Structures are given as structure tokens and as C-alpha cells.
Image (cartoon, grey):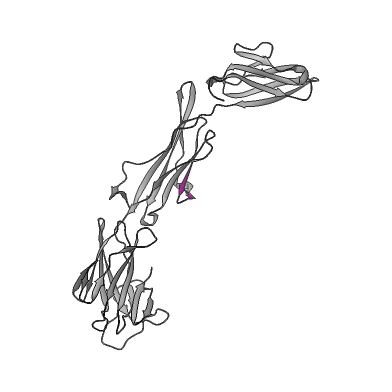
């Protein structure tokens, strides 16, 4: 009911005549009244002979929120029934804030830090219900702190504010995901969803031991490397002493500007050899730089079999890799009219 609404009727009914009708009014008092001696502002309604027991409140006020109880006696037996009297007040628009200690850079959040976010639903009645989602999936309970609820009297109403904090460690893998706080309230038909996009900023990530299939003897070939960074990096290649910047051509080589893929923070970097008959390089160096740092990638072209295993060669070139760790072989060869694209796929 709306606050200060007039002539609010509360009526219990039974299918038998009532011998006695008593009531407990909604509010803080637990006193029981006979309907013949009600306090000011409350009048009896209903007909005992028709099984009716009830009251009319002259004006609905904030101190009358609660349970109305009618106690009736029928043929010597006592029965009780109740009506819940509530006032519903929709909360204010939801607030979603991040901590002032959050490290921001280039319009986003620096990776590898603890993000503290707080959702607030103010001055509703009853209190709102908050739910957190990460990328449309419920957030793990271990990341959510207990909710804090406070009460504030406004215009005769005890309005309630609820706020809750989550602690989320932000990594590059969360880039592009959405942190949502969803509010449900009895006075609102549809949920209120407030979102915070996770624009996670990070330097180009390392890729150890990049191997591609050797280039063909003739025609053209393209070295295709996929890297991860945010924001988009600036790239340059070094091949046999030549420095080729993105978007430029040097001799037989052409370096393309990184192209974003369908995944957030993922870029494809291409270097084309327009004439392999003039040179078949076996070692390529790719350097990627953004505001957060620089990463250098070493790409080796080697001969592999159909299963991606290196074929031991009998020529004079040394293909041994002295570094420790595992070598990941992801090779794709695409031949079309003597053109080969050597691709390393993640």
C-alpha cells in the first residue's frame, strides 16, 4: 500500500457465523483488541453473521507496517488468520563503483591487481536483493563479501540501503568480460542490471619457442603469428639484418599492421616474403610494443613432417635449441599457385 493511503480495509472471512471477533493491529504493538473497542483511527468492518471480521484504517502510516491478525471464535473454537501489511518503495538507481586504489592506465585497468568493486542499492523498502555476475555467470561466493544493510528514516518510512563488495583479481584472461550487479526488488517488475566492462590493459605476452614450417624454394610465403596485448601493439620485424616496420616494405619483405581477431586483445601479425627464390630466411625476430611494455618473439623456420615433428636435416644449418622447456609446434601450410603461408596458431 501507498503511504498515507486512506480507508485501508483488512478483512478476514469464514464460511460460518462468528461468535466473537478480536484483532491485533499491524505495527509494533502486540495488544489484542475487541472490535467493539478499537483505538482512534480504526473502525470495525464486516458482519459476524456472514463470517466477517475486520477493520478499516483511516490512514495507512509507516508505524502500521506489519501483520494484521484476526482471532475469531466459532462454536466455542478459536481460530486465527493474518494479513501482511507492507509498504513497497522502489530503490534508487543502482550504483557500481570501483575502489580509488585501482590502478588505471590508458582508459582501462592495469592487469594483475586486485579489483575491489562495490554495488549499492539505496533507500528501498523492503531491502533489495543483490546478485553478482562475471561474463553472465554467477560470481564465485568466495569473491563476494557479506552484504551491509543500513536503515534510514525518510518521510516517515524506514528505508533500507544494501551494499556489497567483491574482490576480483584481474588478469589478462578477463579482458573483455563484464562484471554485473543485478538488483531485484518487490516494487520493480524487471531486474536492474548495472555493468562494469573489464578493459584490462597488459603488455604483449610472451610466447616461448615459436617454430614454423620452412619457407618454399620459390613463390611467396607469409609468416603469420598470433599475439596477445592490450592496447594494440606497434610491431616491427628483423630478417637477416633488415628492419621492417609495420605497414612498410623493405626489399622482398612486406610487414602488415596487426589485425585484431574476434577475441579481445588478440592480434594477427603478418610478414610476407614476396619472392622466396631470392631468400629463404630461417630466423625471424618480431618486436611488439605498447604503453605497458615490449616483447620480442623469435621465430624459427624448420622442416617438419605431417605430424608436426622436426625432421633432422643433414645440411650445415644448426637447428638445435639450447633453451629449456617444452617446444610447441603449431604449423599450417597453405599452398596455392606456389604461395605458402606458414602459420603458427595459438
Residue 337: percent from left, percent from top: 35, 82
Q: Nearer the viewer, residue 3 or 67?
A: 3
Quadrant (top left, top right, bottom left, bottom right) of the C terminus: bottom left
Q: In the rendered image, is residue 26 in sight?
A: yes
Picture quadrant of residue 53: top right
Magenta stretch: give its range.
130-137
Q: In the rendered image, is residue 294 in sight?
A: no
Q: Name the dominant secondary structure of the magenta segment.
A: strand
Picture quadrant of residue 102: top left
Kindly identify the residue that appears in the image at 35 percent across and 73 percent down. Answer: 343
Q: Nearer the viewer, residue 54 or 260?
A: 260
Quadrant (top left, top right, bottom left, bottom right) of the N terminus: top right
Task: Please identify the residue farthest to the bottom as the structure is shown.
Answer: 314
Residue 300 vs 94, above or below: the answer is: below
User: Is residue 44 within the magenta segment?
Assistant: no
Residue 293 vs 297, above or below: the answer is: above
Residue 183: percent from left, percent from top: 48, 39
Amino acid at each position: 500500500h501507498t503511504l498515507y493511503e486512506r480507508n485501508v480495509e483488512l478483512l478476514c472471512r469464514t464460511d460460518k457465523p462468528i461468535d466473537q471477533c478480536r484483532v491485533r493491529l499491524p505495527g509494533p504493538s502486540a495488544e489484542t483488541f475487541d472490535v467493539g473497542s478499537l483505538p482512534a483511527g480504526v473502525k470495525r468492518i464486516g458482519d459476524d453473521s456472514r463470517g466477517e471480521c475486520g477493520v478499516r484504517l483511516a490512514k495507512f502510516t509507516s508505524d502500521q507496517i506489519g501483520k494484521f491478525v484476526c482471532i475469531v471464535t466459532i462454536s466455542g473454537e478459536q481460530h486465527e488468520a493474518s494479513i501482511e501489511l507492507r509498504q513497497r518503495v522502489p530503490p534508487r538507481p543502482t550504483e557500481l563503483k570501483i575502489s580509488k586504489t585501482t590502478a588505471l592506465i590508458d582508459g582501462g585497468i592495469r592487469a594483475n591487481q586486485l579489483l575491489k568493486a562495490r554495488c549499492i542499492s539505496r533507500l528501498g523498502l523492503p531491502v533489495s536483493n543483490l546478485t553478482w555476475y562475471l561474463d553472465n555467470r554467477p560470481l564465485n561466493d568466495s569473491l563476494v563479501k557479506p552484504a551491509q544493510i543500513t536503515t534510514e528514516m525518510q518521510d516517515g518510512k524506514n528505508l533500507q540501503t544494501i551494499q556489497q563488495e567483491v574482490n576480483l583479481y584481474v588478469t589478462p584472461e578477463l579482458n573483455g568480460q563484464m562484471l554485473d550487479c543485478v538488483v531485484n526488488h518487490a516494487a520493480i517488475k524487471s531486474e536492474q542490471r548495472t555493468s562494469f566492462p573489464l578493459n584490462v590493459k597488459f603488455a604483449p605476452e610472451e610466447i616461448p619457442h615459436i617454430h614454423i614450417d620452412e619457407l618454399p624454394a620459390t613463390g611467396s610465403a607469409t609468416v603469420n603469428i598470433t599475439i596477445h596485448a592490450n592496447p594494440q601493439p606497434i610491431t616491427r620485424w628483423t630478417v637477416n639484418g633488415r628492419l621492417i616496420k609495420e605497414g612498410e616494405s623493405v626489399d622482398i619483405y612486406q610487414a602488415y599492421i596487426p589485425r585484431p581477431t574476434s577475441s579481445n586483445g588478440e592480434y594477427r601479425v603478418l610478414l610476407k616474403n614476396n619472392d622466396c627464390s631470392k631468400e629463404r630466411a630461417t630466423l625471424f625476430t618480431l618486436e611488439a610494443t605498447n604503453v605497458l611494455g615490449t616483447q620480442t618473439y623469435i621465430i624459427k623456420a624448420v622442416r617438419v613432417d605431417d605430424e608436426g615433428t622436426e625432421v633432422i636435416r643433414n645440411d650445415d644449418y644448426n637447428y638445435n635449441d639450447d633453451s629449456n622447456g617444452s617446444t610447441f609446434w603449431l604449423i599450417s601450410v597453405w599452398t596455392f599457385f606456389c604461395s605458402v603461408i606458414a602459420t603458427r596458431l595459438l
